[in-house]
Each structure stands twice: as C-alpha cells, then as structure tokens.
Amino acid sequence: MEHAPIDLAAALATFDQLWSPRIVTTVNDYDVRVAKVKGEHVWHAHDDTDEFFAVLDGELQIGLREGERERTVVLPRGSVFVVPRGVEHKPSSKDGAAILLFEPSGTSSVGDRHETVPEHVDVTTGHALA
C-alpha cells in the first residue's frame, strides 16, 4: 500500500455535516479525525481514553465538569487540548470551527456516558473520507 500526504483542508472540503467526524488516517490503533463544528455538542465522557483536540480553524470552547467544579477552556486556532479520560465535557463553537481529533479506533463521538443526543449530533465512530 502506497502512502501519500493528506491535505486536511481538502479532506474538510469533502463534507458539510456538522459534528460528524471523518477518519483521515490511522496511527497504530488510533484514528486521526477531522470535523466541522458549530453550536453545541453534548455533555459526555470517555471512561477509558483521553480525547485530543486540535483547532485547525475558528475557535472551540470545551466545557468541563471536574467533580463539583465546572469550567470552560477556550481553544483559538492552532491550539490543542486533551480532555482526560472520565471527565465530562461539552465542545461548542459559537461561530464554527474545524477540528482534528486523535482517539482510539472505534471510540464513539458521544463517549461511554452522555446526555440525550440532539438530532444535529452524529453518533459515530467516524466516517471514512469520500
């Protein structure tokens, strides 16, 4: 199998659906996913894995519930953040963003525990690029 560079902007241009990550490549047993986001996702937690976020364009906010404490981290373009395993979190973006995610293959976009999932959030383990 021949490997070739992946243009992330071109990958993002292949779809329009929000909160519906696409798998651009796999590293060992981890998926590298890209997604377009706008509005709010859903409060959720991944019990057995951390979740890596990188902001490619726009700005992402991630609400975090850590014990009794709730806070929001703001990720401008070019920044990265890791949500530790087991921490409830809720990504959102007022004006829209393009993000890159790095997590074990087969990880659900709404984690192991989540609130009711609204229609605009795709419950997926990632879609292949078209």
Image: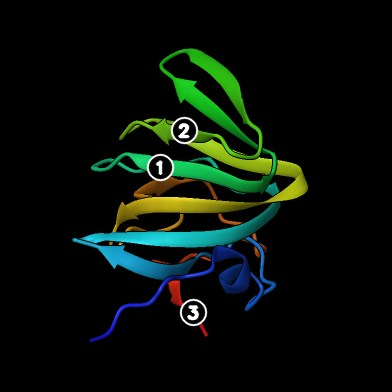
Real-space CA distance between mark 2 and mark 1, rounded to the nearest whole angstrom: 6 Å
Report if residue 45 is visible in the image.
Answer: no
Instruction: Provide the secondary structure element on which disc 3 rests.
Output: loop
* Local SS, label 1: strand
- Which amino acid is tagged 2? Phe
Q: Are marks 2 and 1 in contact (CB under 8 Å)?
A: yes
Residue 51 found in image quarter = top left
Measured in 3D between alpha carbons, the distance from the residue under mark 2 to the one under mark 3, in whole angstroms, is 24 Å
N-terminal of the two: label 2 or label 1? 1
Residue 81 seen in the figure: yes
Residue 27, position as x, y percentages in the image: 25, 61
Percent position of residue 3, x then y: 31, 78
For disc 1, the marked residue is 52
Chain-order first, disc 2 or disc 3: 2
Dot 1 amino acid type: Phe
Q: Are marks 1 and 3 in contact (CB under 8 Å)?
A: no
The residue under the point 58% across, 44% down is: 55
Residue labelled with disc 2 = 81
Which residue sits furthest left?
Answer: 28
Residue sitting at x 69%, y 50%: 97
Quarter assignment of residue 127:
bottom left
* Secondary structure at numbered mark 2: strand
Q: Residues within 10 Å of mark 1 (few under 14, many from 20)?
A: some
Return the x and y of residue 29 as percentages of the image width and height. 20, 61
Q: Position of residue 113 (x, y in %)?
A: 38, 45
Decide: is 78 above or below 66: below
| Sequence-first disc among 1 and 3 | 1
Residue found 33% across the figure and 58% down from its top: 107
Q: Which residue is mark 3?
A: 129
In the rendered image, the quadrant that contains the N terminus is: bottom left
